[in-house]
Amino acid sequence: MVPMLHEMYDGLRVEHGEAAPAWAFIYVEEAHALDEWPISSSRYHPTGEVVAVAQAKTVDDRAEAATHFADLYQLRLPVFLDTLDNEFQTTYGAWPLRFYVFEASTLGYKAMPAECTYSISDLWAAASAACTRTASAR
């Protein structure tokens, strides 16, 4: 998934230049933390190891998990942390994974999963349309 996001990020910058959106990755609470709802899945782990992360008890715990994730997946996007009260997740329904397009601080698109996956082409279309509107407004 991360390589596809990088391709989309790069493609939008090439296609739309300065009108391309700013991107961010918000690290929210663990979906299947070792100490809450563990599953032994390695489905998306680049080394094939089982994902094993405890639920963050402190901001430092969450920062460490986010840094590990970003390093492991070679994430090139800026990473921000949700609060320990999970404000972003609660407000936007981000758990366990979601994609959004915001325009001028307004939610313009929220990807919804279908059959446990997301349409990257729908996300591209929403982001590209937002770029076009941004360029037209200049």
Image (cartoon, rainbow, N blue to C red):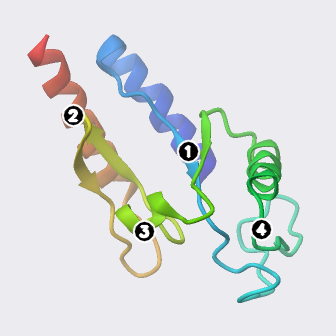
Which one is earlier in the sequence, the residue at label 4 or at label 3?
4
Mark 3 Cα shell of 10 Å, populated few (<14), some (14-19), many (≥20):
few
Q: Are marks 4 and 3 in contact (CB under 8 Å)?
A: no
Mark 2 Cα shell of 10 Å, populated few (<14), some (14-19), many (≥20):
many
Considering only vertical position in the picture, is 23 above or below 36? above
Q: What residue is rendered at 51% in x and 65% in y?
A: 97
Residue topped by disc 2: 130
Residue topped by disc 4: 57
Mark 2 residue type: Ala
Q: Position of residue 137 (x, y in %)?
A: 10, 17
Query: From mark 2 to mark 4, how far is it between C-alphas?
Result: 37 Å
Q: What residue is rendered at 42% in x and 28% in y?
A: 22
Residue topped by disc 1: 25
Callout count: 4
Mark 1 residue type: Phe
Mark 4 Cα shell of 10 Å, populated few (<14), some (14-19), many (≥20):
few
Mark seen at residue 102: none
Mark seen at residue 90: 3
Mark 4 residue type: Lys
Which one is earlier in the sequence, the residue at label 2 or at label 3?
3
Q: Nearer the viewer, mark 2 or mark 1?
A: 1
